[in-house]
Amino acid sequence: MNGEMIQTKVKELLQKMYGDANSEFNFSIGWLERFKTRHGIKSYRRFGESGSIIMENIEYALPQIRAKLKIFYWKDIYNMDETGLFYRLQAYHSLARKQLEGRKKDKERLTIMVCYNRDGSDKVPLWVISKFANPRCFKHVNLDNLSCHYRANKTAWMIGLLFKDFVRWFDARMTGRKVLLTVDNCPSYPKVIEGLRNVELFKLKEVISDLHYRNVMDEDIIQGVMDVLADD
């Protein structure tokens, strides 16, 4: 929706309600700004894909999700997600004396995997995935001493093999506990990983992944990233 659509719709409503009695009314930009302020209308970026979700599917899946979560304490329910960091991407706006020329967007990226539990008491160290196993900037750095776990593959994506490595590492970290690890319905994530002793892997159904996981839990997990970085 945009301002022009609002102006057009209001004109139609005014015509239906009062006919030509207010035909001279001016729906100016100033009127539009006051209208948006009065009704709390702002410009928001679309997030996630909840608009394409069928609510009946959600109502069917939610009881199964709730039944699984009830078995565990909050501190034993973990959520893992991944996000892309386009570290070479320039800002869209910049201070200058004249109009700046645009440049092709640099899509070089890292994948950052984040995991923490439901009550926020345990923030698992980040996993960072790059294209380069031994980048120049780490020439004199012992990767084992980083505050995160660094991995690499040619795409810098979370592939199935790396996902297995993470889950098995996480399982060892949870020794002495019984925890639930919820993950997205990503096709590259194996449904079953054998040999887990402390972790139950729970892939959220596609409909729940789309609506709840991406829109709500993703926001929480990104905030978790900021908290982890702040703690460091």
Image (spheres, rainbow, N blue to C red):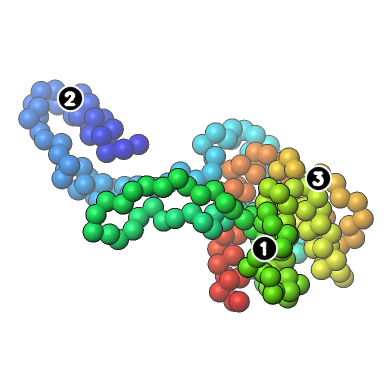
Q: Position of residue 150 (x, y in %)?
A: 71, 64
Q: Position of residue 80 (x, y in %)?
A: 69, 56
Looking at numbered disc 2 in the image, what kind of residue is underneath it? Answer: Gln
Numbered label attached to residue 54: none
Q: Position of residue 115 (x, y in %)?
A: 68, 61
In the image shown, does 163 or 107 lie closer to the viewer? 107
Q: Helix, strand, or loop for circle 2?
A: helix
Mark 2 vs mark 1: give the one in front. Answer: 1
Please report whichever mark, 2 or 1, sits nearer to the chain's N-terminal start. 2
Q: How many marks?
A: 3
Looking at numbered disc 1 in the image, what kind of residue is underneath it? Answer: Pro
In the image shown, does 63 or 8 lie closer to the viewer? 8
Looking at numbered disc 3 in the image, what kind of residue is underneath it? Answer: Pro
Please report whichever mark, 1 or 3, sits nearer to the chain's N-terminal start. 1
Q: Position of residue 12 (x, y in %)?
A: 22, 26
Q: Where does label 3 land, which residue?
A: 190
In the displayed structure, does residue 117 sit left or right of residue 108? right
- Residue 11 appears in the rendering: yes
In the displayed structure, does residue 232 sit left or right of residue 122? left
Q: Where does label 1 land, which residue?
A: 135
